[in-house]
Image: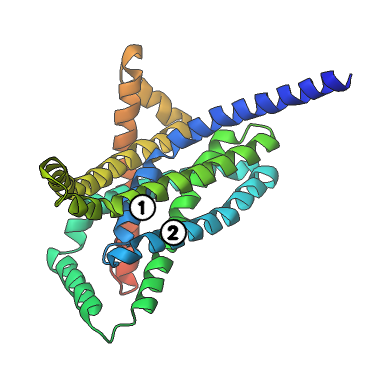
Amino acid sequence: MAGASLFALLDDIATLLDDVSILTKVAAKKTAGVLGDDLALNAQQVTGVSANRELPVVWAVAKGSLLNKAILVPAALAISAWLPWAITPLMMLGGAFLCYEGVEKLAHKFLHSKDEDDAHKAELTRALADDRTDVVAWEKNKIKGAVRTDFILSAEIIVLSLGVVSSAPFGQQVATLIAVALGMTVFVYGLVAGIVKLDDIGAWMLDKGKAMAALGRGILHATPWLMRGLSIAGTAAMFLVGGGILVHSIPALHHFVVGLAPSHLEWLANALGSVVVGVGIGAVVLAVVTLVQKLRGGSAPAH
């Protein structure tokens, strides 16, 4: 009997882990839009940091990200246990926020002139070159800013993941959210660490022989394009994921979108409908935020 109980326990554990693995994969797909933006934003956050401090800064932000998720995961589980009705509205808010971020990125050049961006970069360069600048304090501020950004993105990830596992047993919810939180943190900040060191790797290769030098030059040339590509992919995924959440959360809208195309093209109708809805909702939210900012005497938020 003891042996049978042990095997039954192992089978239960294996089944639980399998379910958690499936739920985690689904949750990871749902959070793809946030993930793409997370990579680009956090890689940009360490721009301006000296080469020998890049990895320590990334590690400090990663630790802040883990603390963020240590707060957000229990909060999400508490909502699932005591306020399950709030999950769908929270998902819709998360989806609307994703769409707003996407539209804000597209509208950035209209809301903020190139002169403003150039002035900010020049000011940053001057500050770093000034011996009187407190580099330690400056670096801490960089880290705090990155951790604040991560908190918003982590909240989106946890809310979207919670929507996926809301109907699963509580134990699976706990395991899945923890797996998503840890997996996303390791993946995002591991990749960010690799991205910010690409230029150093490329420069190191330049004096290692013709073949290595050619590869190094290729890396140096490709790194800025990689950053742009991540930003573009992240923005596109914001509309697909954020708009998709809104479309699927409103049955009438979902039926309307699906009905626009024959059954074999339903996936295309879903994708295009999600993008259109995402852009529309994002534009409305951005207009409201911009109006509020102007009434308060500020400017539209920027990434």
What is the three-letter code of the residue carrying label 1?
A: Ala
What is the three-letter code of the residue carrying label 2?
A: Trp
Q: Quadrant of the N terminus?
A: top right
- Residue named by callout 2: 59
Left or right of 52? Residue 190 is right
- Residue named by callout 1: 193
In depth, the one of 214 and 266 nearer the eye is 214
Residue drawn at (39%, 44%) of the image: 35
Residue drawn at (21%, 71%) of the image: 120
| Residue 265 image label | none
Is 134 located above or below residue 175 in the figure?
below
Residue drawn at (49%, 31%) of the image: 25
Residue drawn at (53%, 57%) of the image: 68
Compute the Cα span from label 1 to label 2.
8 Å
* Mark 1 Cα-neighbour bin, 10 Å: few <14, some 14–19, many ≥20: many
Which image quadrant for residue 117?
Answer: bottom left
Pinpoint residue 290: horizontal percent, then vertical percent: 30, 62
Q: Are marks 1 and 2 in contact (CB under 8 Å)?
A: yes
Q: Quadrant of the C terminus?
A: bottom left
Q: Residue furthest right?
A: 1
Pinpoint residue 44: horizontal percent, then vertical percent: 29, 58
